[in-house]
Each structure stands twice: as structure tokens, then as C-alpha cells.
Image (spheres, grey):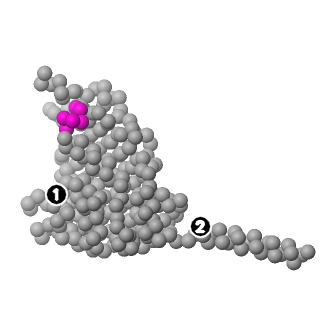
Amino acid sequence: MPSKKKKIHLLTLLALASLFLTACTKPSPKSLVKQAQQSKIANFQLKIDEHYYTGNKPVRFYGQINYQRSPFVMQADLTQSGDQNVKMWVGQRYAYVKYYKDQQEAWYKAKLSQFTTISHFQQLVKDMDTLTLSQKSAKLFSVSRTKNGWRLSYTGKSQRLWQEITETNGLASLSSNSQMAKAKLQQIRMTIDFSQKKQLTGLAIYAKYKVKGQTNSTKLSMLKVNQQKKLAIPKTVSKNSVDVSRLNK
């Protein structure tokens, strides 16, 4: 009888060990990239910080965007060269933009159809919640364990990855630097973060590249994926805004 009990205990321990090892098995880069592409993204925060040149003049473009898929709401706070700032709320029908006039600030609203640039920007940000990387690019990444789950990492000069980032995933369109896609790549650093359950939680890209011999850089971070509080356009904005469509009537 004692030997039978020992055998049962041993089998139980082996089963538990097997489950533990299965849970801790390192996933492949391909499987994690596929998981990221299949993740259903409801909301996220996007941060961008760029340094580039217009002629010989250095320009910095930076800011933050909060995005919610349904109901669609986008909040943006973007600055160029320190003195050109745009604050914006975009909903399903209207865009609200804060302007400064005579040292006073005011919110103005208009239908999205009246702001083709805003509706275009709206579509670009919607496209950002779809990550598209080829299987060949997926092989470039290494996998590591983090305290919250898993991380894919890559540092290098892959032209294929650069093309996929700037063209397929629309980073060049979201960027204010129109020459990014045709630039000479110097380095990419990219990380993609996942939870313990292998759900996408964040993404960060840093790229350094040259345009006409001048070094430019872009840092883009997608944070708090599916962890944002519910977004809603504040009543202080919607109720106190000036409807630009009526100004000329």
C-alpha cells in the first residue's frame, strides 16, 4: 500500500511539473507577432516625439493622443517647435479644436466633413491599432520574460522592417516628417509587450535616419492598450464651443 501511495504522489508531482513547464515555455517571435495582430484593441494612448529639419532649421514635433474605438473618441495635444500647439477632441460627428486669439483661448467645432485633414488624421490613428509585420520580420525579434508577461525586442538596420513600419503600418503618414519613408535608415529599436496571457499591451519604436545628410529621429509609443479609462468629450468643450459652420452665415 505505501508504495502505491508513493506512486500516486509521484504521478501528481509530474503532472504539476508538466503544467508548470508548459505555462513557462518561451513563445516564439512568430507566435507573439501573430497574437499581436489578432489582438482586439479597444483603446490606447499614443505618444510621439520627432526631431527633424525643414531646410536647415531644426524642428521638434511631439505630443500625445488618446484613442477609443467605440464609441469613437480621440483626444490630441500636439506641439511643433515649442510654440505651435493644437489641442483637439474628435468624436463621431464633430471635431473640436482649441485656438488662441488675442491672448485668449476658445474652442471651435465643425463637422468632420469640413476638416478633411482631421478626418484623414482620424483614419490614420484608427489604422494604428492594426500591427502588420511579415513572418520574415518576425524572425528578427528576440523574446524575453518581463514581470508582466513577454517582450519582443529588436535593434538593428533591417530595411524590410523599416519599410513595413513606415509604409504598411502608416508610421510615415502619422509622422509630420513627410520624408521619413524615403530616408536612409541608421537604426531601429523596437519592442512589443504582452501580458501573461499573451495579449498586446504596448509597443515602442525608436528610429534614427538621415535625410539629405541631416540626422532625424522618431520615437513612437503605444501605451495602455485596452487599459484606458472611458473617453468622452467634456461638456465644457462641447457646450462652450463656437460652431464655425455658422460664422459666415
Give coordinates of residue 43: x percent, y percent.
Answer: 40, 47
Span shown in magenta: 110-115
Give coordinates of residue 123: x percent, y percent.
Answer: 27, 46
Return the residue nearer the eye: 33 or 225: 33
Q: Residue at x 58, y 69 (%)?
A: 24
Looking at the rendered structure, which numbered label has been put on residue 96? none
User: Tag 1 or tag 2, which sits nearer the N-term?
Assistant: 2
Q: Which residue is mark 1?
A: 178
Query: How crowded is the residue under tag 2: few (<14 C-alpha within 10 Å), some, or many (20+)?
Result: few
Give coordinates of residue 34: x percent, y percent.
Answer: 43, 63
In the rendered image, residue 112 lying in the magenta stretch gets the answer yes
Numbered disc 2: secondary structure: helix
Q: Quarter holding the N terminus? A: bottom right
In the rendered image, residue 214 lying in the magenta stretch gets the answer no
Give coordinates of residue 33: x percent, y percent.
Answer: 41, 64
Q: Which residue is mark 2?
A: 23
Q: Pointers 2 and 1 in contact (CB under 8 A)?
A: no
Q: Residue at x 27, y 39 (%)?
A: 88
Numbered disc 1: secondary structure: loop
Return the residue nearer the eye: 106 or 18: 18
The CA span between labels 2 and 1 is: 45 Å
Query: Is 125 drawn above or below residue 149 in the view shown?
Result: above
